[in-house]
Image (tube, rainbow, N blue to C red):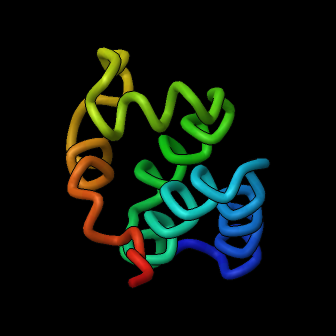
Amino acid sequence: MIEESRLRRIRFRAWHRGTKEADLLIGGFFDKHGRSWSEAEADLFETLLDEQDVDIMSWAIGTAPCPARYEGVLMQAMRALDYVPIEK
């Protein structure tokens, strides 16, 4: 189980990216999945947070090839985009 203080730090970083689009994509992804992650998955997500927002977004929507280190369950879930709220 991941420490609550670590989850709060990760959530802050996920939701404070610099643009609303990145906040929704990355922060929304964390909110949907973050509490279910193992330590290794949280480590990988924290490493992903060190990347540029435009890169993360490109990998998630499939407009750029994703580095092998991020391919797998985490990126597959991010690509689902079912966690991004669409206002009508």
Residue 77, image quadrant: bottom left
Q: Is residue 13 above or below residue 51?
A: below
Give percent across and percent down for residue 3.
Answer: 65, 76
Residue at the image point whose x is 35% and y is 39% from the top = 60
Q: Is residue 39 above or below residue 73?
A: below
For the C terminus, the quadrant is bottom left
Image point (39%, 75%), residue name = 86
Q: Is residue 33 left or right of residue 54?
A: left
Q: On the picture, is 81 further left or further right than 2?
A: left
Residue placed furthest toward the front: 88
Residue at the spot 57% in from the left edge and 29% down from the top edge: 54
Q: Which of the 4 image quadrants contains residue 5?
A: bottom right
Q: Residue 78's spot in the image, x, y percent?
A: 32, 51
Out of 73 and 52, give the one closest to the viewer: 52
Vertical arrangement, residue 61 with respect to residue 78, above or below: above
The number of numbered badges drawn on the structure is: 0
| Quadrant of res 59 | top left
- Residue 40 place in picture, x, y as percent: 43, 49
Q: Which residue shows up at 73% across the image and 75% down it?
A: 8
**Image check: 81 left or right of 46?**
left
Query: In this view of the protein, which residue sits in the foreground, 37 or 14?
Result: 14
- Front residue of 65/42: it is 65
> For this view, does 28 lie left or right of residue 79?
right
